[in-house]
Image: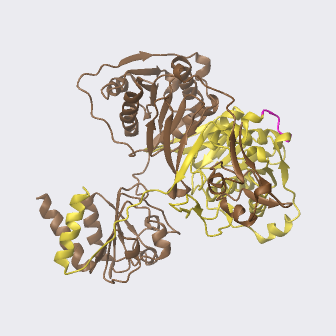
Amino acid sequence: MAKIIIHNEKVKAHDVLVNLCPFNAIEFMDSKITINSGCKMCKLCVKQAPDVFEFFEEEVRRVNKSEWKGIAVYIDHVEGDIHPVSFELIGKARTLAEKINHPVHAVLIGENVMQAAEEIVKYGVDEVFVYDETELKNFRVEPYAACFENYIESVKPSIVLVGGTTIGRSLAPRLAARFRTGLTADCTVLDVQENTDLDQIRPAFGGNIMAHIHTPNHRPQFATVRYKIFDAPEMIDKPFGKITRYTVSKDLLKSKIEVLEVHDKAKSESIEEAEVIVVVGSAFKKKEDLSMAFKLAALLDAKVASTRPLIEKGWMDAKLQIGLSGRTVRPKLIITCGVSGSVQFVAGMKGSDQIMAINIDREASIFKTAHYAIVGDIYEVLPKLIERIENERL
Amino acid sequence: MNFEVKASSEEGYMEILVCIKQVPGTTQVEIDEETGVLRRDGVASKMNPYDLYALESAMVLKEKYGATVHVLTMGPPQAEHIIKEAYMMGADHGAILSDRKFAGADVWATAYTLSQGVKRFCKPDLIICGKMTTDGDTAQVGPEMAEFLGIPHIANVSKIVDVTRSNMTVEMDMPQTVEVAKVEFPCLITVEKGIFQPRLPSYKLKKSTAQLNVQYYAFRDLEDQDEMKYGLNGSPTQVKRIFPPVGNDAHEIWEGDSDTLTNQMFNALMRLKFI
């Protein structure tokens, strides 16, 4: 049992206390401070007003952590084609496993996936647990969860890492619910304590706050991680991992879902997934001039996006608009060309890792957000920059 | 969407439940580095924007086939606002799970409480959730609920292809592919932003639903009376601390002729490994 005890007798300024809570969970009613169900147990109130709010915890359940051994990675794949996030997770699992001296497991569920298992071993896992059945041809949540459950029951891993893909985000919650354990989504930092507790750091509120989360009393500890958060490991020279086939009863392979068809997605023009973006703004005088931006984008392997005015002119597709009424992007690099930087636009891109802004006006508001403010004319800078990069490549 | 009407709207209305959540009106929260306090500018709460797509999907199905649309949320009594908003979009019944015992719930406890609430509230053929919320950003509560209810689910649904009396066919958005899958009722889906364009609340409905009740459920109303499964007690995960993200605080202004500027840009792009 854990709760926050309120010492109402010590309340001096109730309005100040009510405002302490970012989730509006502290209320003042009938001359008493109470906490409603909006409480996230972030304990900010305990930190800020420790005389009034007291965190009270009584340990009830204790899991025997030494019974749970191993770090498992779910191998995300479509028909044997492994999603690279799985390799990144193997890399992370190896680092964590070294610290606590646990083995690294890969869990591979599908049809005709033995070849994929061979590939996984090359990344240095200790054992690949393979469930290979016709019924597992396509991802369907019930049979996949049943196989994963079988692995967890048989092996009792301490930590399970799952890619934050469509499949991972379907599978991990089912299992976490089933094993009555914690699941932390979209972790950006993972580390492990000596007692095998997983330290998980993840963004919340659209990345505006970071939360450090742990699962102190339940096993296994589930975490999902998105693609490109961790680095993929090098392949090892002498793979040593075992490949073992496991089976579950046919009954468990039944599903109420029937996959009728899998087709390739039209090549994504989506700017949200781009790592590098070149943005065109009102400084472009003619539609043809946009070719400069496309040329630069091609050299940087970037996507071209737009501000709203160019879309209203019909020069760019509405799907390429960044801003409050368009898309929100957080690429590794964004280069804005002749963009003044309205509040609405900035709201859609200020989370970018590196922001370079080219604008002729030194007072342009985009420069407040930019990490690199380039005060210059796009009609001079862009052609020269393109030439310079092209020369470099020769 | 080009599915024909196969479900009879006369007998056995489809029962749809939409799960919604009240979230802070903005995600632009900042943390005071010294005190660790979240700075908010007195922003109001609103319905989680992703839930609007879930509600709209329910409304489209209701119009095509005839359905009763229930909405359910967990939160403080103020969350009644979003139930009222759902009424203005065409929802028929709404309920709030509200109790101090639900406070501090993580994904597990939230999903468990909601699943208990569903059992008390209605018998849905279809549960629709938004893809994620804007405050928690986990996208995991829907699938955990489906597990607790023992029903199949399909996440990241980008299109509803067909609906019959006993099942629905949807498109699931995968990283590289699209899977077309048929799923039997009862089931749960989480829908992508953009599956339909959400309608605006209607003034007419606002008037006509003004007197419509919102059902309240507390811990004592739920079937499972084990307090250790709700709120903080029921939450396997704990927040150790929250802190501001480390930002890139470089701020350089480069001026000069275009050759100088080009050089500086080129060098920066090299240094940052983009060239």
Chain B tint in image:
yellow
> Where is A3 relative to A307, above or below?
above
Report whether A9 appears left or right of A227: right
Place of residue A390 in the rendered image (x, y in percent of width and height, measured from the top left): 16, 63
**For residue A263: magenta?**
no
Report whether A11 appears left or right of A266: right
**For residue B224: magenta?**
yes
Magenta-drawn stretch, dominant element (helix, strand or loop) = loop
Q: Quadrant of the N terminus of chain A?
A: top right
Report whether B210 appears left or right of A272: right
* Residue pictured at 25% horizontal, 66% vertical: A295
* Residue pictured at 76% horizontal, 57% vertical: A10
Place of residue B90 in the rendered image (x, y in percent of width and height, measured from the top left): 77, 60
Q: Which chain is brown?
A: A
Report whether A42 appears left or right of B88: left
The magenta segment: B221-226
